């Protein structure tokens, strides 16, 4: 019960911040999806979170995610893959994920499409955009986004959800999310269905909300200090 109370406290604090920030920005909090990032946390935390009304869960490593999906198969959860995706894992991830937030190159599209088709599901895909063009941290360059969006939109069993970005460490988050919002508006001109903006983690989700984020990827603000990677 002590852990359940810790999770309830963290979750309520984040939900309250989301509501207050949305109201201040003239937005409806109901349009925001809070993805609780459970990477490195035990499956028992996922079960406890489900009891608190959490339905959207984020993971970043296929091996860990697939095990937790199986262990939590009796729960009504929506699984978000948020980590950097390897081409040889794309097909497997698409078999259990409902949404992928980190599609940043065309080589991932065939595997994701095949895996989603085999699973009989439509996989929602956020394009991860590199705001500063640094190739070492993941994310497609701005110039590659149109072709990548077209590839997803035309692939079997894939649905273009919108854009995702992680602010460069040296940038003011407000600048980063302002740029992300601008890139989203540009994408919507070509793909009106791609209205999602995945932006904001524990340290910057308030700024992300102020700039139109529809999906937040929040971990430690809900779950507490992250356990060490094994």
Image (cartoon, grey):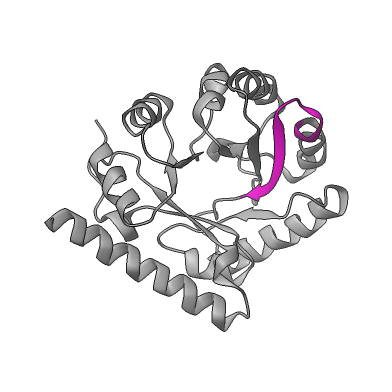
Residue at the outermost left position = 2
State whether residue 11 is above or below residue 124: below
Residue ID at (76%, 41%): 145
Of the pair 69 and 152, the residue shown nearer to us: 69
> In the image, 68: left or right of 170?
left
- Residue 9 image-quadrant placement: bottom left
Q: Indicate the quadrant containing the C terminus: top left, top right, bottom left or bottom right.
A: top left
Task: List x then y, in percent, for residue 94.
Answer: 56, 26
Task: List x then y, in percent, for residue 182.
Answer: 74, 61
Task: List x then y, in percent, for residue 180.
Answer: 67, 58
Q: Which residues are magenta?
A: 152-164
Of the pair 152 and 123, the residue shown nearer to us: 123
Q: Is residue 156 magenta?
A: yes
Residue ID at (22%, 43%): 227
> In the image, 18: left or right of 72?
right
- Residue 188 image-quadrant placement: bottom right
State whether residue 174 is above or below residue 46: below
Residue ID at (17%, 54%): 3
Q: Indicate the quadrant containing the N terminus: top left, top right, bottom left or bottom right.
A: bottom left
Residue at the outermost bottom position = 24
Of the pair 21 and 4, the residue shown nearer to us: 4
Can I make out residue 172 in this image? no
Residue ID at (60%, 59%): 214
């Amino acid at each position: 019960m002590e852990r359940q109370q810790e999770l309830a406290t963290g979750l309520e604090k984040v939900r309250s911040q989301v509501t207050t920030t949305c109201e201040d920005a003239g937005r409806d909090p109901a349009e925001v999806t809070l993805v609780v990032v459970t990477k490195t946390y035990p499956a028992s935390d996922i079960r406890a979170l489900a009891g608190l009304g959490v339905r959207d869960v984020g993971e970043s490593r296929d091996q860990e995610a697939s095990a937790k999906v199986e262990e939590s198969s009796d729960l009504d959860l929506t699984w978000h893959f948020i980590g950097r995706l390897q081409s040889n894992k794309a097909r497997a991830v698409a078999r259990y994920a409902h949404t992928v937030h980190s599609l940043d190159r065309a080589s991932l599209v065939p595997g994701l499409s095949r895996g989603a088709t085999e699973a009989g599901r439509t996989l929602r895909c956020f394009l991860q955009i590199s705001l500063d063009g640094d190739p070492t941290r993941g994310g497609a360059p701005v110039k590659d986004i149109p072709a990548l969006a077209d590839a997803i939109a035309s692939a079997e069993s894939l649905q273009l959800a919108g854009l995702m970005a992680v602010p460069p460490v040296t940038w003011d988050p407000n600048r980063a999310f302002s740029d992300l919002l601008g890139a989203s508006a540009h994408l919507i001109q070509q793909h009106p269905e791609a209205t999602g903006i995945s932006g904001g983690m524990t340290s910057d989700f308030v700024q992300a909300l102020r700039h139109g984020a529809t999906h937040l990827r929040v971990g430690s603000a809900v779950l507490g200090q992250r356990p060490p990677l094994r």
